[in-house]
Amino acid sequence: MQEGRNVRELEFLPSEYLWARFHRRVRFLRSWLLLVLALAMVLWSLQVGFWVQDAQAELAALCGTESVVDADVAKVRMLRAEGQLYSRRIEAVALLRPRVMATDLLAALADLLPEGVVADDVTVDHSPRGRPEQARIRLAGVAPTETAVAQVLAAMEASPAFEGTVLVESKPAVAGDRAGARAFIVAADARIAPPAKE
């Protein structure tokens, strides 16, 4: 019954009223849509502001990191320059060391050998690795014990005439009737006068 009365009322309403009511509803929906869009724009602008603040904070942190890295780079450059200066000083000191003749070097080597140690072979390799002022000394011999081999090595390491002394080989000697004898090879570098050119 109620529905029938509403239908009859709608049938008798003027068309201008129906059109005005339709426009009123459209304006209402449009105003709500504009309000929602405005609220979305405000929220979007706030979010963009937060993003900009985060980006600025990251940029400030990166600028601070760059200043720390610059300090480290300066330290590395300073250390590299000091290392080069130290290398030049080492080279200058090496040039100031007097060169000795091979015969003087062999005499010094003979004085270093402990009692009972016999040198079988001594070779002098001039200009190893392309350095004309350096010579590589190679001593091969026989010692009565392993302790005597260690004494030869220690004496050459302590001598100012030799540097970079290394024990190349130490093994039981097969020749001779001495028990416990050791055949050894020791190598060392020395500053030596180059051989005379003919």
Image (cartoon, rainbow, N blue to C red):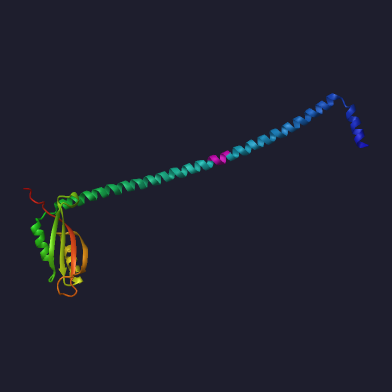
The reply to whether residue 106 is visible in this rendering is yes
Q: Which residues are magenta?
A: 48-52
Residue 40 lies in the magenta stretch = no
The reply to whether residue 157 is visible in this rendering is no
Q: Position of residue 111 (x, y in %)?
A: 10, 65
Residue furthest to the left: 198
**Residue at left offset 84%, top offset 26%:** 17
Camera-side residue of 71 and 176: 176
> Left or right: 32 with respect to 100?
right
* Magenta residues, dominant SS class: helix
Image quadrant where residue 170 sits? bottom left
Image quadrant where residue 110 sits? bottom left
Camera-side residue of 151 and 74: 151
Camera-side residue of 169 and 70: 169
Is residue 75 shown above or below 165?
A: above
> Left or right: 172 with respect to 73?
left
Image quadrant where residue 178 sits? bottom left
Q: Position of residue 187 (x, y in %)?
A: 18, 60
Camera-side residue of 82 and 49: 82
**Image label count:** 0
Q: Position of residue 37 (x, y in %)?
A: 67, 35
Is residue 181 shown above or below 23?
A: below
Is residue 113 shown above or below 191?
A: below
Q: Position of residue 15 (x, y in %)?
A: 85, 24
> Left or right: 184 with respect to 49?
left
**Residue at left offset 63%, top offset 39%:** 43
**Residue at left offset 18%, top offset 68%:** 183
Is residue 84 shown above or below 185?
A: above
Residue furthest to the front: 175
Name the quadrant of the N terminus: top right
